[in-house]
Structures are given as C-alpha cells and as structure tokens.
Amino acid sequence: TQTAILMSIISIVAFPSTFIAGILLDKVPVRFVVIAMFMIYIGGLVILLFTTNIWIAGLFAICQGIITGVNSVCFAYMWPAYFGTEHLGSIRGLSMTATVMGSAIGPLPFGFLFVRTGDYSTAIITMIIITAVGAGAALLARPPAKNEAPIMSKEQ
C-alpha cells in the first residue's frame, strides 16, 4: 500500500512539473534547468538516505515526481537544440537503447553493494556523486553558436 501511495505521488507531481518545465525552458537555458533538476535529484537522494517513515519517503517521492516531469520535457527540448534534427531518430534511438540497458543493469550494483554492506547507503551516496558530476558536465555544456547551428533536416 505504501509503495502504491508513493508511486501515485510521483505521478501526481510529475504531471504539473511538465508544464512548469516547459515554461522554464522558454525563459532559461536548458542546461540550467538540467542542473536544477540534478540538484533536486541530489536533494531527493539525501532525503532517501534518512528515510525512516512513509512521510519522509513522501518527500523523496515529491522530488522524484519533479525529476520525472522535468526530465521528459528537458531532454525532448535538448536533443534537437544540441544535435539538430537530420539524424535525430538515430541519436534518440541509440540514447534510448543505452537508457534501457542502464535501467536493466543499474539495479545490479545496488544489489551488490547491499549484499556487501547490508544497506543501500553506499549505493545512494555513489548516485549522489554521479549526479553531481552530471550537474558539473551540464554546467560546462554549451549549445552550438548561431554560426555553428546543428544541421536541420531537408524538410525544414
């Protein structure tokens, strides 16, 4: 029951987050929205480290819902802005394949670390570090300059 409640919170929060992300992306460079998304994720992971009851887990679910909503809009916006549209299908196909593989393989290190340490703290701290590195990479990412605009498809 608690898991169903938390999953519902994620979905309920994700819905308006997509609209907010769309508004933000019209006003703020995408890399800053991605950085904010990563910071919220780090905050959620820190909350997860200290979760002792359903109420604290609910705070994590709220963070996860924000991430879910913002992520879907950010990356749909970012791919053509950074890579153009001529080969967008191939690029998105490859990235989706990597995402699915990561989703399939990702639980293995968590399980391994749980068996070795007896809890998930080490895995969560590792995710915090990886997310912080991703935020740093997003800070360094620069969209192509106007004279270096990505190649658009022939139909455009």
Image (cartoon, grey):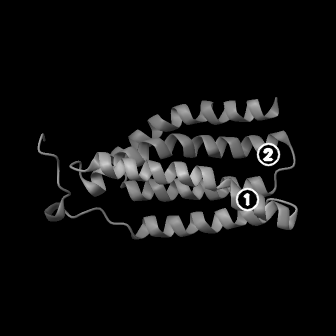
Name the mark on residue 54. none
Q: Give whichever of discs 2 and 1 has the lower sequence position.
A: 2
Which quarter of the picture shows residue 66?
A: top right
In terms of depth relative to the viewer, which is nearer, 120 or 51? 120
Name the mark on residue 110. 1
Which residue is at 84% across, 67% downward?
116
**Camera-side mark, 2 or 1:** 1
Q: Secondary structure at mark 2?
A: helix
In terms of depth relative to the viewer, which is nearer, 111 or 34? 111
Q: Which amino acid type is shown beneath numbered disc 2? A: Ile
Residue 64 percent coordinates (x, y): 63, 45
Q: Which amino acid type is shown beneath numbered disc 1? A: Phe
In the image, taking residue 149 as reference, residue 43 lies left or right, namely right
In the image, taking residue 37 as reference, residue 117 lies left or right, namely right
Query: Where does the N terminus fall, quadrant-wise?
Result: top right
Query: Where does the C terminus fall, quadrant-wise?
Result: top left
Which quarter of the picture shows residue 12?
A: top right
Which residue is at 42% across, 52% downward?
95
Residue 102 percent coordinates (x, y): 56, 54
In terms of depth relative to the viewer, which is nearer, 54 or 122? 122
In the image, taking residue 144 as reference, residue 73 lies left or right, namely right
- Badge 2 density bin: few <14, some 14–19, many ≥20, Cα 10 Å: some
Q: CA distance from mark 2 to mark 1?
A: 21 Å
| Residue 105 drawn above or below residue 130 | above
Q: Secondary structure at mark 1?
A: helix
Q: Which residue is mark 2?
A: 56
Residue 65 percent coordinates (x, y): 61, 40
Residue 34 percent coordinates (x, y): 46, 55
In the image, taking residue 105 as reference, residue 147 lies left or right, namely left
